[in-house]
Amino acid sequence: MMDYKDSVLKESSQVLDYILKDKLTEEDKDRITKDSIDNFNNHVNPGWLKYRKSVSTDATFVEWADSEETFTDTYGNEFIDCLGGFGVYTAGHRNPEIVKVVQAQLNRYALHSQELVDPLRGYLAKLVAMCTPGDLQYAFFCNGGAEAVEMALKLARLATGKHYYISTVGGFHGKSMGAVSATGKGLYRKPYLPIIQGFQHVEFGDAKAAENAIKNLIAVGETVAGMIVEPIQGEAGVILPPEGYLKELRAICDKYKVVLIFDEIQTGMGRTGTMWACEDYDVVPDILTFGKAFGGGIMPITGIIARPHLWTEQLKENPWILGSPTFGGNPLACAAAIAAINFTIKTDLPGQIKEKGRYFMDHLLKLKEKYSILVDVRGKGFLIGLEYKTRQIGWAVSKGLFKRHVMTGGTLNNARVNRIEPPGIIAYKTIDTIIERLDETLTEVTEQFK
Ligand SMILES: Cc1ncc(COP(=O)(O)O)c(C=O)c1O
C-alpha cells in the first residue's frame, strides 16, 4: 500500500471513535468543529460555510443528533426544525417506529444480491399503487429526486415515441441533466447549455399557454411526449395552482396524448394535507414522482409510479431499458418507505398536517397584518411560504430565527420567500413557540430595515 495508509487509518479511526462513542468529550467537540471548518473549506467547497454564515452569525454549529422535531449541535444546542430538510422530515426526525423497522432489516440484510427476488421492493410497489389515486400501478425506485424525474421523463418518451416536453417557469425538478432541463430557472440551467433539447417552458398556472405550446410544436412538425409540473410549486416560492388549472392540464394532455407528470417529490406523503397534493385537486397524473419524505426521514429512496398503459411491451420485455440503479429500491430503503407509509396512514399524518397547517396559517396571517415587511403568506398544509419585501429582509428573518434556535430556509428559485416546512408530527405548543420567536424576529428586522 502507498504511504497514505497510516494517515488514512489514523484519521478514519478517529472519526469512527466519534461515531461509536456515546458521549463526546469537550475536546472532541472543539476538534470536530475545527475539523469541519477545515474539511469543508479544503475538501467540500469553501462556499458552503460562507452560505451558512448568511443564516447564522456563527458558521460553527455542527449538526450531531436529531429527534422528532429538533436537531442538536455538538455542544447540545437544540434547534426547532421549521424547515423539515426541505420536506424530508414529514414523519419527524428519527421516527422511532421507522427506525425500529430499518434496524430490524439491517440485522437481516441491507443491500441485495441484484439477482434473487427482493420481496420488499414488490411489497412497496404494491403499497404505493394502493395509496396513490386512480390506476397508477407500476413503480420504479431510485435514490434521489432528480433521478426519479429522469425516469419519468424517459418513460414519457419510451411510452409515446414522442420528443418534446412542456415544463413551467420557476418549476424545480432537480439538477441532473434531464431534471435541470425541466427546471425553470436560468441560474441553474445556463452553465450547462445546450442541455436536453426539446423543453418548452410555459408560465405556471396558465393552462392556455401549455396548450398553445403543444399545439404550436405539433403545427411545426414536432411531437410532444410529456408535461411535467409540480401540483404546488415549492422552490418557486410556494405557488398554489389557480382554480381548475390542474384539471385543465389533464384535459389538454388527454386531448393531445401527452403524458402528464406530477412531480410530487416535495408535496407527497402528506406534506400539503393530503397523502398526495393531486388528490385535493381531484386529478390523476399518468406518472407521479415521489421522494424526500418517502423514506420516512431515515433512508434516501425516491421513485415514480405510472399508469399501466405506459408500461409498454418493450419495457416489459426488458425492464432495464428504463434504468437499473444499483441501489434503487434496496431492502433497507424499502423497509423505511414501507414503515413511512404505514406510519403516515395509521396516524393520519396528512389530516394532522391539514389541521396544524390551518392553525399555523391563522397565526402567520395575523403576523402579516402586524408587519408590513411581510407581504404575503401562502401555502397549504405544512408547505408555507412567507414572502418579504426584499431578499435581504428574507435573509435577515432567517438569521433572526436561527439566532432564536428556529431553523427555516429560503426557496431555491425565489430568494424573497422563506419556507415553513416543519415535521408533520410537530406539537401545537412548538408551533406557538415558533410564532412567538417569529414575532420577536419581525419586530427586530422591521427596526433594522427602517
Ligand atoms: C419538486 C421537486 N422535484 C425534484 C427535486 C429534486 O430532488 P433531489 O434534490 O432529491 O434530487 C426536488 C428537490 O427539492 C423537488 O422539490
Image (cartoon, grey):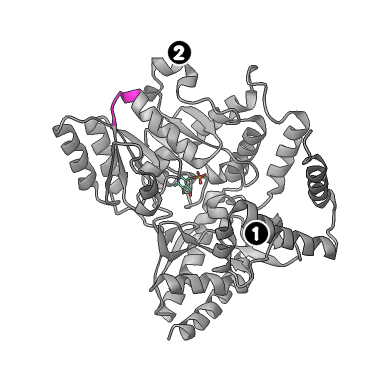
The span shown in magenta is 159-163
* Circle 1 SS class: loop
Confirm whether residue 366 shows in the render.
Answer: no
Q: Which residue is mark 2?
A: 317
Residue sitting at 46 percent across and 69 percent down? 362
Q: 101 or 72: nearer the eye?
A: 72
Q: Is residue 375 magenta?
A: no
Closest to the camera, between mark 2 and mark 1, is 2
Q: Is residue 161 magenta?
A: yes
Q: Residues within 10 Å of mark 1 (few under 14, many from 20)?
A: many
Three-letter code for the amino acid on which mark 1 is drawn = Glu
Q: Is residue 228 above or below residue 40?
A: above
Three-letter code for the amino acid on which mark 2 is drawn = Glu
Q: Which residue is mark 1?
A: 69
Corner quadrant of residue 246? top left
Residue 164 position, x and y percent, is 28, 34
Q: Is residue 94 above or below residue 357?
A: above
User: Which numbered disc covers residue 293?
Assistant: none
Is the stretch drawn in magenta largely helix, strand or loop?
A: loop
Q: Residues within 10 Å of mark 2 (few under 14, many from 20)?
A: few
Quadrant location of the N terminus in the rendered image: top right
**Mark toward the start of the polypeptide (2 vs 1):** 1
Q: Is residue 150 above or below residue 33?
A: above
Quadrant location of the C terminus in the rendered image: bottom left
Residue 51 position, x and y percent, is 54, 63
Considering every residue shown, the one lying at the far top of the view is 317
Residues at marks 2 and 1, CA–CA distance in whole angstroms: 46 Å
Corner quadrant of residue 428? bottom right
* Circle 2 SS class: helix
Residue 361 position, x and y percent, is 47, 66
Residue sitting at 59 percent across and 70 percent down? 56
